[in-house]
Amino acid sequence: MWRFFFTAEKRESRVFAEVSPRKLWPLLFSAVKKRPTLSPFNKHNNFSTMAIKNVSVIGAGTMGNGIAHVFAQSGFSVTLIDLNADQLQKALTTIGKNLDRQVAKGSLTEDQKTSTLSNITNSSDIAEGVKNAQLVVEAATENTDLKLKIFKQLDEVAPEGCILATNTSSISITKIAAATKRPELVIGMHFMNPVPVMKLVEIINGYATKKEVTDTIVELSKQLGKVPCAVNDYPGFIANRILMPMINEAIYSLYEGVAGVEEIDTVMKLGMAHPMGPLQLADFIGLDVCHSILKVLHDGFGNPKYAPCPLLVNMVMAGKLGVKSGEGFYKHTAGSKDLVVSDSFLR
Ligand code: CAA
């Protein structure tokens, strides 16, 4: 043991002797000089949430319009970007309706509604839409190739120092960041549906995300009235690593005939105080989305416990995707809140 101690000590002193302070200083100095400018926001090279005023949101679907809504309501100037002009128009109508609902409930005044809407502009061109952004939040379709393409383009057109966030629910932040030349400025900002209602923002640090960027996004989420939770980048992060196995287990319970759709959901709603049962929630999220997140968990961990239930796989192949397709475990009629079990699962 003593021999080991002495050789270890000798090895250590040799390392110090080889890299003497005189040799070390120029190295350190050049490293500091070469450090990339992290942000143009202030001359001391510190990030500041105060400096984030212009936020661009990419994708005008359910999540994108919700994200634009909460930023605009908190006074940020928002550019909502989607290549599809009809989708943009639909998103603005949805935001208007959700604001009306808040006004009717008394949680927002007419004036606040008007100023929220006036904070939103839209664009069908990414380069034009992000040219003044200090933060971009991408909420496009959950498709890896599409997100990599968007981030590569964003890196070319977004201002230097602009933070690039993704609302991905499961794709690796590290992989998305690697498509850019600014991986230290890439971060996950995972909002929950419906965005104006759900308090959580799961903040995901990629392998290279700078601490200052995480701190900025944490503070910014608080400014939106949300509760941020910072986690690290591993498959499913925290939200879906825990939620999706529960949903999958509920589907397995149905598949194996342990109980029917209503019974499974009622047990979880009344027994565990969940606002929706896991099968209703799966319909709400989209069965295709649940399936693809389970595949990310299965591939990422290589553990069979994450394998999507064969019933889920069949339903996705049959196009029974839940609310978005009109049928999943339940039948969904636009405008109706009634829970009607799908004919396939009547007992
Ligand atoms: N915009 C603004 N307000 C909205 C809204 C929207 N889009 N949707 C609902 N609301 C408000 C309503 O006005 C109502 O407000 P008050 O409480 O002030 O009355 C409140 O939300 C409740 O709405 P409803 O009365 O219409 O309906 P509900 O009581 O059935 O609640 C729900 C609806 C909020 C969606 C509730 O069922 C719920 O919390 N469900 C679970 C949602 C959930 O788990 N989301 C996470 C999904 S996972 C995810 O998003 C991420 C992922 O990666 C898969």
Image (spheres, rainbow, N blue to C red):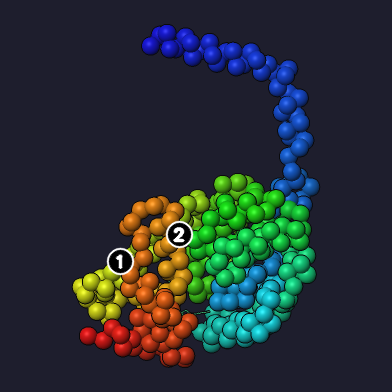
- Number of numbered discs visible in the structure rendering: 2
Q: Residues within 10 Å of mark 1 (few under 14, many from 20)?
A: some
Q: CA distance from mark 2 to mark 1?
A: 17 Å
Question: Would residue 6 be found to the left or right of residue 217 on screen?
Answer: left
Which quadrant holds residue 59? bottom right
Residue lying at the far left of the rendered structure: 258
Mark 2 = which residue?
Answer: 296
Residue type highlighted by circle 1? Glu
**Residue 41 percent coordinates (x, y):** 75, 53
Q: Residues within 10 Å of mark 2 (few under 14, many from 20)?
A: many
Which quadrant holds residue 255? bottom left
Q: Nearer the viewer, mark 2 or mark 1?
A: 2
Q: Quadrant of the C terminus?
A: bottom left
Foreground of the two, 129 or 67: 129
**Residue 70 percent coordinates (x, y):** 60, 72
Q: Residue, x 75% and y 58% (percent of image)?
A: 156
Q: Quadrant of the N terminus?
A: top left
Residue 67 visible in this rendered orientation of the protein = no
Q: Earlier in the sequence, mark 2 or mark 1?
A: 1
Mark 1 = which residue?
Answer: 249
- Residue 94 sits above or below residue 264 on the image: below
Q: Secondary structure at mark 2?
A: helix
- Residue 145 sits above or below residue 64 on the image: above
Q: Residue, x 56% and y 47% (percent of image)?
A: 207
**Residue 115 percent coordinates (x, y):** 69, 79
Q: Residue, x 28% and y 79% (percent of image)?
A: 261
Q: Residue, x 59% and y 68% (percent of image)?
A: 139
Say the numbered circle drawn on residue 159: none
Q: Secondary structure at mark 1?
A: helix
Residue type highlighted by circle 2? Val
Residue 179 visible in this rendered orientation of the protein = yes
